[in-house]
Amino acid sequence: MASGLFALLDDVATIAKVAAATLDDVATQTVKAGSKAAGVVIDDTAVTPRYAVGFAAERELSIIWRIAKGSLRNKLVFLLPAALLLSALMPWLITPILMVGGAYLCFEGAEKLIHMLRHDPESQDEEQSAAHTPEELENEKVSGAIRTDLILSAEIMAIALATIEAPQLLTQAVVLAIVGVLITAGVYGAVALIVKADDIGAAMARGATKGGLRCIVGRALVVGMPKVLAVLSVVGTVAMLWVGGNILVHGLATFGWHRPEEIIHGLAHAVAPLIGPIEGAVDWVVRALASAVVGLGVGLVALGLLRIVRPAASH
């Protein structure tokens, strides 16, 4: 009887050790995967605020929440099982799918950039929109944001999956789920703060001592945030181009054509050392801008092809 009890306790201890090792492995893999995917988080944060601008203040957080829920659904319901399935059965298909998504980002970024240059940025969305009511416009914006998020999330999940070294399918799934939830919370939490910063500033300035630090910071937020959001709108459009271009350049290198990637790396290595103390930041900026140029070129080609196809389809 005693020996049976000791055997049971030994089994429990063994299970506990395995569980602890698994949790430790999940934590380690999550940190590695999350840090690798962090670069795309910057792009995602830059792209998203533009979808919540132009609505009544009381609708802004609701719109961000709707987009965040759509982003979680993209990552956990669609991309996570698809990534694991493709990784196990058809890993060669992941890069082409990402490249198709990258091409779509290039197309969307080029289209928005052209409208910015040709028209008033504040009216361009209304010209393109088919919505007739504020509710329809909100639904249209949210749908567009979730479509764009799908591509950015796909890159995040692909980068995270490529970083995971654990062979167990369950560990991979748990790590991807944790990375997806944490990144979504981080991105849309930051977006909510950006969009509501002017309201926070107004609340700080209200009732504060005139000339005091709280009043000065509050007024600065109220005055400065519209300009910041305008800049972010442009940055978000350019981010679509550099993310899309970067996906395409890396995809081409994966299939053996390294020349575009080599040119971008060579340009960054030539320019960055000239700056000195901020060499690393300049290296990143040059790579991003070069990828954006590639993305703009691809996007313009896609726009041109679409204009040729549309009239032909209408006849």
Image (cartoon, rainbow, N blue to C red):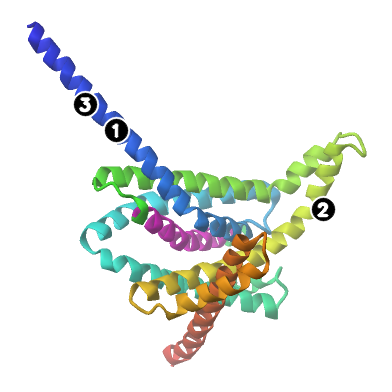
Residue 105 included in the magenta stretch of the image = no
Quadrant location of the N terminus? top left
Q: CA distance from mark 3 to mark 1?
A: 10 Å
Vertically, is 165 above or below 117? above
Helix, strand or loop at mark 3:
helix
Which one is closest to the eye, mark 2 or mark 1?
1
Q: Is residue 28 left or right of residue 92?
A: right
Which residue is pictured at 37% across the width and 79% down the height? Answer: 257
- State yes or no: discs 3 and 1 in contact (Cβ < 8 Å): no
- State yes or no: discs 3 and 2 in contact (Cβ < 8 Å): no
Q: Which residue is mark 2?
A: 223
Q: Which residue is mark 3?
A: 15
Vertically, is 94 above or below 45? below
Determine crowd level at label 1: few under 14, some 14-19, many 20+ residues with C-alpha closer than 10 A: few
Q: CA distance from mark 2 to mark 1?
A: 52 Å
Q: Which mark is residue 21?
A: 1
The answer to whether residue 131 is visible is no
Q: Is residue 13 left or right of residue 76?
A: left
Question: Is the stretch drawn in magenta largely helix, strand or loop?
Answer: helix
Which residue is pictured at 79% across the width and 54% down the height? Answer: 224
Upstream in the sequence, badge 2 or badge 1?
A: 1
Q: Is residue 171 left or right of residue 200?
A: left
Name the residue nearer the viewer: 22 or 124: 22
Determine crowd level at label 3: few under 14, some 14-19, many 20+ residues with C-alpha closer than 10 A: few
* Residue type marked 1: Ala
Q: Quadrant of residue 274?
A: bottom right
Q: How many marks?
A: 3
Q: Which mark is residue 278?
A: none
Q: CA distance from mark 3 to mark 2?
A: 59 Å
Vertically, is 73 above or below 303? above
Helix, strand or loop at mark 2:
helix
Q: Which residues are magenta?
A: 138-161
